[in-house]
Image: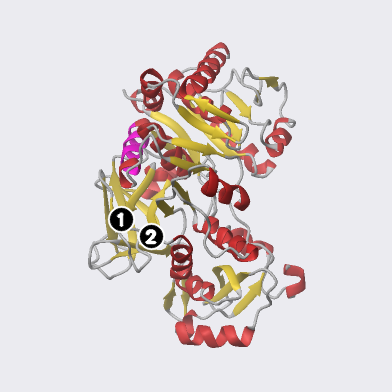
Amino acid sequence: MIRLHHAFDAWLARDPQRPFIHEPQRTWSFAALGAWVDAAERELRADGVRPGDRVLIVAENCVGHVALILACSRVGAWSCGVNARMAQGEVAAFDRQADARVVYFTHGVSDAAAHHSARFQGVRPSALEGLSRSAVRPEAIAETGPEAQGIVAIIFTSGTTGTPKGVMVTHAGLLHFAGVSARSRDLGPDDRSYAYLPMTHVFGLATVLAASLHAGAQLLLRHAFSPDDLLDALAHHRLTTLQGPPTLFSRLLAHLDAKGIARPACPQLRYLYTGAGPLDLTLKQGVEARFGQPLHHGYGLSEYAGSVALTRLGERRDDTAAGHVVEGAELRIVDAEGNDLPAGQRGEIWLRGTGLTPGYFRDPEATRAVMKPGGWYASGDLGELGADGALFVVGRLKEMIVRSGFNVYPAEVEAALNAWPQIQRSAVGGRREADGNEQVIAYVELRSGMTLDEAGLQAHLREHLAPYKRPALVLPVEQLPMTASGKVLKRQLLERFPVGQPEETIR
């Protein structure tokens, strides 16, 4: 069986001194990283970690986390990354769910990870500098059988639309997508990618780490996002590819505006990509104008070990399509009864293929709820196919708002709001009224130093949205709550800022 670490070991044997990871204070060759992977493997085996065990890693990006992911692959254990910036209760819930043999903490780069480690009994130092680990849990139960041997990781869903679940990711799916992702941007050994995306998320694990291992490309590894650091990397550190959620690009444009920078210096940059969230046309046009090249887009999810659709290299589109289905994947747009819909009609996205998860860890009920006859996975996402076969993602089925009998897709309303010059970004949700109808509620984050011209905004919305789509309330918030991977926590937003609160309590 081909496993994730085989991609690393191949480069280690072929070109051990080739640079792979660049941190601000140190560059790591494949050989230097290999020494850490060896040490991590020895430590895991000494702690009794076995094939089918889970190793929970409370982490922010660092070389130690990469080494643990690869060492777990060598041992046959499953790495279970949890972003250290999650709350205490969230980490505790993931720990219970994972039933991990041992828990690691990347305290050297993360105060949040250090705080989490302080709550665990018997925390010990690790052979890897900047990491610590819990006492061994003898009661943890290893998974056995052929399916268990094929699992490389558990990705915990962010919980933006419900209870978080543990998505089982396979070696085969992850490695297949690594090749697809690398080919989609012609990635090679001379490329350098900005690796700030958390490797606890499928975007960072698959599109950044696994694809770079496949191609031998280099990583500028960062544990957090800094616009100034990114601009420096673009200007001075030969960054060739930049990927991130739409919120990264929104923050970057706001930073450029604040600095008065019309066109950032990026002499080697050749590929821009955004995913992990809906893309609105205003943001896309703004990024393309600033960088002078296409902003590529795609549709992916944890349950597919990467992307199901991607725009084509060199293609410049004037819309926000997520592109065409990738090699090894299939998708359908279906109605409520599971019948295929023609191009131009909206329905739920169903998919299957090489990257599809075998299910949610120790949650057969949740797995049965989404797996359909014929091996199809019901994504809960709403989309439609364009005339050329490209996929357009319009929102989440659970987030769709029913107003006066009409369907309202939050992404559509957000696109109209984001086109208003005073608004940096927005989030739209529905709030049920006593009669069963739903109000459309918009929360908006304003650009620096601006106040909301409500009359002007309403005139703008009347021009661009049908009456039933217009928000009943537009509420300014200082900052939209987000996951570490850049998704807006709409459920949390609606809970934290109930409709009717005075604006001053929202700020």
Cα separation, mark 1 vs mark 2, equals 8 Å
The residue segment tinted magenta is 172-181
* SS at badge 2: loop
Residue 314 falls in which quadrant of the image?
bottom left
At label 2, which amino acid type do we have? Pro
The residue beneath circle 1 is 314
Where is residue 427 drawn, in percent x and y? 56, 67
Q: Main secondary structure of the magenta part?
A: helix
Instruction: Give left or right: position of 433 versus 321.
Output: right
- Left or right: 460 in relation to 331: right
On screen, residue 439 versus residue 241, left or right, reads right
Q: Position of residue 484 (x, y in %)?
A: 58, 48
Total numbered circles: 2
Q: Quadrant of the N terminus?
A: top left
Return the x and y of residue 43 as percentages of the image width and height: 57, 15
Residue closest to the far right: 504
Residue 142 makes an appearance in the image: no
Q: Is residue 58 visible?
A: yes
Residue identifier under label 2:
294
Q: Earlier in the sequence, mark 1 or mark 2?
A: 2
- The verdict on residue 179 being magenta is yes
Q: Which residue is at a point 68% across and 75% down the rendered structure image? A: 450
- Frontmost residue, 93 versus 45: 45
Does 33 lie within the magenta span?
Answer: no
Asked if residue 72 lies left or right of residue 257, the reply is left
Comparing 360 with 69, the one in front is 69
Q: Are marks 1 and 2 in contact (CB under 8 Å)?
A: yes
Q: Residues within 10 Å of mark 2 (few under 14, many from 20)?
A: many
Comparing 195 with 137, the one in front is 195
User: For the residue labelled by badge 1, is the local secondary structure a helix, a strand or a loop?
Assistant: loop
Residue type, mark 1 in image: Gly
